[in-house]
Image: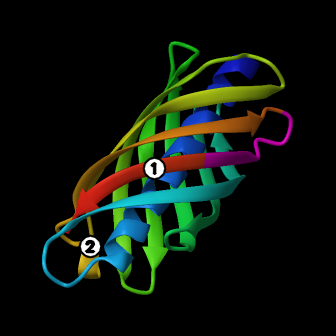
Amino acid sequence: MGLRNGHSRVVAAFVAIIVAGACGLAASSSPAASSMKVTEHVVLKLAKRTGATKFAHTGHATGTLSGSVRSVTTLTHSVVLRGTVTINTSRGELRLKIDGRARTLALRTRFDGAATIDGGTGRYAHARGTGRFTGIVNRSTWASTIDASGSFTY
C-alpha cells in the first residue's frame, strides 16, 4: 500500500511539471501556430487520496510560465503512474496526459516519465506537444517537486 501511494504521487508531480512546461511554451510564442521549448519547476501537495491508488494534487508551476496546477493520478502495478494534469494560466488552461514510473521505493521516491499535451481552453484550445519529467515525492506527506521540459504548438 505504501509503494502504491508513493507511485501515484510521483505521477501527479510529473503531470504538473509537464503541464507547466506546456503553458510556458504557449505564453512565449506568437499568436500564429509555432513550436517552442519550455522548462518548468512544479511543487505539489496532496489534496485528496482515494484508497491506495488514486491521488489528487494541487500546486504551482514556475519557469517559462507560472500558474496553478491540478492533477489526478492512478497507480497501477505498484510502480506505474498515469493521469491528467491541468495548468491554469491567465490565457487559459492546458491539459496533459502523463505516463510515468517510480524508480525507487524509499521514503523519498524518485520518478520519471513522459507527458502528452492534448488541448485545453482559451489560447491553448488546440495545443499539442510532448515532454519529459523527473521528480521526487515524500511518501510521508505526499508532497512532490518536479522538473519538466518539452515543446508544443498551439
Figure check: 36 above or below 84: below
Residue 78: horizontal and vertical position, in percent? 58, 15
Query: From the viewer's perspective, is 140 left or right of 94?
Result: right
Residue span colored magenta: 140-146
Occupied quadrant, residue 52: top right
Tag 2 residue: 124
Residue 20: horizontal and vertical position, in percent? 48, 62
In the picture, the quarter occupied by the N terminus is top right
150 drawn magenta? no
* Secondary structure found at label 2: helix
* Secondary structure found at label 1: strand
The mark lying in front, picked from 2 and 1, is 1
Figure check: 36 above or below 51: below
Occupied quadrant, residue 79: top right
Q: Is residue 1 visible?
A: no
Q: Can residue 108 be seen in this view?
A: yes
Please name the residue shown 55% across and 64% down the image: 69
Mark 2 belongs to which amino acid? Tyr
Tag 1 residue: 149
Please name the residue shown 71% across and 45% down the image: 144
What separation in Å lies between label 2 and label 1 (alpha carbons)? 18 Å
Disc with the residue nearer the chain's start (2 vs 1): 2
In the picture, the quarter occupied by the C terminus is bottom left
Residue 24: horizontal and vertical position, in percent? 43, 69
Please name the residue shown 46% across and 74% down the image: 88
Figure check: 17 above or below 115: below
Please name the residue shown 16% across and 67% down the image: 126
Nearest the camera: 53 or 141?
141
Query: From the viewer's perspective, is 125 left or right of 94?
Result: left
143 drawn magenta? yes
